[in-house]
Amino acid sequence: MPPPVEPPAVEGSPASAVAPAAASDEGSTSAPPPQNFWASSLVVPCFIALEILCQLALLVESLSALRVVFRILSFGASLAMLVLVPGRSLRHPALPLVLGAMGFTALNFFHPEAGTALAGLAQLGIQLSIMAPLIWGTRLRMDAKAFRRTLALLFLFNAASAGVGVLQISFPGRFQPALSSVIEAVGEDYTQSLQFELASGQRVFRPFGLTDTPGGAATGAFYSVLLGAGFLISSKRGLIRLLSVGGIFLGVVSLYLCQVRATALMLLACLLAMGAVLALNGRLLRLTQLLLVVGGFAVVGFGWAVAMGGDAVTQRWGSLVSVDAGDVYYSNRGHFLENTVGYFLPQYPLGAGLGRYGMANAYFGDLSSALWAEIQWTAWVYDGGLPVLVLYPLGLLVSLFWALRLALRRDDHNEFSLWGTLLFGYNVGAIAITFSYPFFMSQAGMEFWLLNAALFGAFSHSTRQAAPLPLHETLHPHRR
């Protein structure tokens, strides 16, 4: 099929986002803001705010009867956006690959070993809602300001989660929410393994943060450091830089106390990726700031964490030096990857049927046929076997490549290259996390596609008034 012909650049059309003629002939007059709220850039930060509220609602014991509702509300909202958000989508480079993976996943609803119909529909809905921002997110009239606002919400929430995690260890029992009923149902031996002994001799759970799961603060710590680093290298305002520095420090200390080594290694990979892009772009001052702040806090934060957590923290992190990093990963998560390739993929080459693992199975499925997915790669095999195992990761790599191309731009008066640098590091982290847990069966996976779609849309719309772009061939937003 021949490629679609680029339509004339009409004011307000997606094609005009990259048409050089529009930039030279139409002038630099910006389009009036859309009157419809559902078409405005406010939708993205409001959606993130809804996700945060749903997460916080899980911590309120009086709302425990509505737990399922809050678990699925943000997923349902993402599906609703497909109808509520008007207009035509820009075609993100990863969209065809992800849609292909979704097609094979949908076929597994008819698999003879699939779970209950309700569980299958629930899982299919979750999967579609997670990738849906690639469709509705690019319909919005995004700009750099709206994208920063979205990142700010994510940063503040995750920094707060990391900070609460530090408080939970500093004042044991005072800031800790009720333990998740799902975790509690596993048994006492498992819950005991999620505890450690403080320097004071008191035994406590690993920091929850603003979650109901021991060690859950590690996720907040990860994004607090990563997003804080993004604001540190991109912002010129003193208050924002101060907040970013504080978030980085809280995130580092909280991550040490959570003792989740795999997350720490992934964060290191993200920061190294960001640093490499800054170096390639010649942004040596920003690179130096990043190294000094994060490196300094890595040393100071460890001392503070050991003062609170005692020998348990020292021994846990010391194992990264005394034992090969590959052995550490294999003993914690690597054997799941080995089983995925060596056992589950040959057994389920085209998928295992929907509704047999995760939240969908726990709430709506038949536990007698349940499967366990500890890492995302296992989940991809269950969802659609080899086709999904190829298509979805390729979609992630395409997103990573697009972010890198944006990060390496030099003629950038809107600092999109710096946001591209952050997104590149973020995407590296997300891909790395797939080797640790089912990232794309969670709200975090939905945020991944939302941020990628939001920056893609913001950049594409901004180029309506810009000169011809080096990324023209990669970023051309064909109509869906």
Image: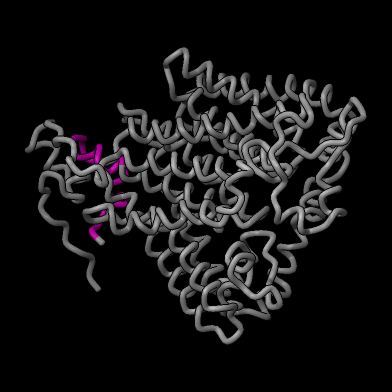
Q: Residue furthest top?
A: 238
Q: Residue at x 17, y 46 (%)?
A: 16
Q: In which quarter of the view is residue 256 placed?
A: top right
Vertical order, 404 against 479 (above or below):
above
Vertical order, 353 against 197 (above or below):
below
Q: Residue furthest right?
A: 201
Q: How are the colours assigned in the image? A: one colour
Image location (x, y in percent) of residue 94 = 41, 57
Vertical order, 455 against 100 (above or below):
above
Q: Residue at x 37, y 42 (%)?
A: 44
Tell me, yes or no, whether the highlighted magenta stretch contains residue 468: yes
For the N terminus, the image quarter is bottom left
Q: Residue furthest left?
A: 25
Tell me, yes or no, whether the highlighted magenta stretch contains residue 100: no
Give the residues drawn in magenta, as a range. 458-479
Q: Residue at x 52, y 70 (%)?
A: 388
How many circles with numbers are drawn on the protein?
Answer: 0
Image location (x, y in percent) of residue 88 = 23, 56
For the residue pair 151 and 324, the one nearer the viewer reads as 151
Q: In which quarter of the view is residue 441 placed?
A: bottom right
For the C terminus, the image quarter is bottom left
Image location (x, y in percent) of residue 155 = 51, 32
Q: In which quarter of the view is residue 471 placed?
A: top left
Q: Residue at x 47, y 53 (%)?
A: 73
Q: Residue furthest front?
A: 62
For the residue pair 55 and 78, the one nearer the viewer reads as 55
Image location (x, y in percent) of residue 14 = 20, 50
